[in-house]
Image (tube, helix red, strand yellow):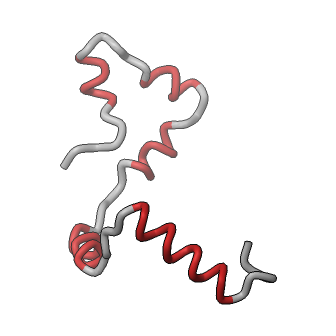
Amino acid sequence: MEQPVDFESLGANSFDVKKLFQDQGWLGYFDILNGPVYTQLVKDFWKRCDIITQEEADKEYNNKVAEDPENNR
């Protein structure tokens, strides 16, 4: 699986930045960021998502605002 930040690949391409982050104490953050991904959960989530156009989103937004214009601006 591809990692969001791949220090080995960056270093192999002469862009070794791992020490910069290590010196600042940020490697723990990247351990979390590069941590486990629950692939089944992600698949189940995306199966239930609807892809809509910007036009559809704008229409839905305008309808919601029109329902209660005082509280929805």
Which residue corresponds to the image point at 41% horizontal and 70% vertical from the top-left? 56
Is residue 42 placed above or below 70 in the rendered structure?
above
* Relative side of 48 to 18, left or right: left
Q: Quadrant of residue 13?
A: top left
Q: Quadrant of residue 65?
A: bottom right
Is residue 66 placed above or below 24 in the rendered structure?
below
Residue 12: image x %, image y %? 23, 17
Residue 44: image x %, image y %? 24, 78
Residue 70: image x %, image y %? 81, 82
Which residue corresponds to the image point at 35% horizontal and 15% vertical from the top-left? 15
The residue furthest top is: 14
Which residue corresponds to the image point at 52% horizontal and 21% vertical from the top-left? 20
Is residue 44 placed above or below 23 in the rendered structure?
below
Task: Count how many numbered circles sit on residues in the image.
Answer: 0
The residue furthest left is: 1
Compare residues 26 and 37 and report the one nearer the observer. 37
Residue 61: image x %, image y %? 56, 74
Which residue corresponds to the image point at 65% horizontal and 83% vertical from the top-left? 66
Q: Quadrant of the C terminus?
A: bottom right
* Relative side of 73 to 59, left or right: right
The residue furthest bottom is: 67
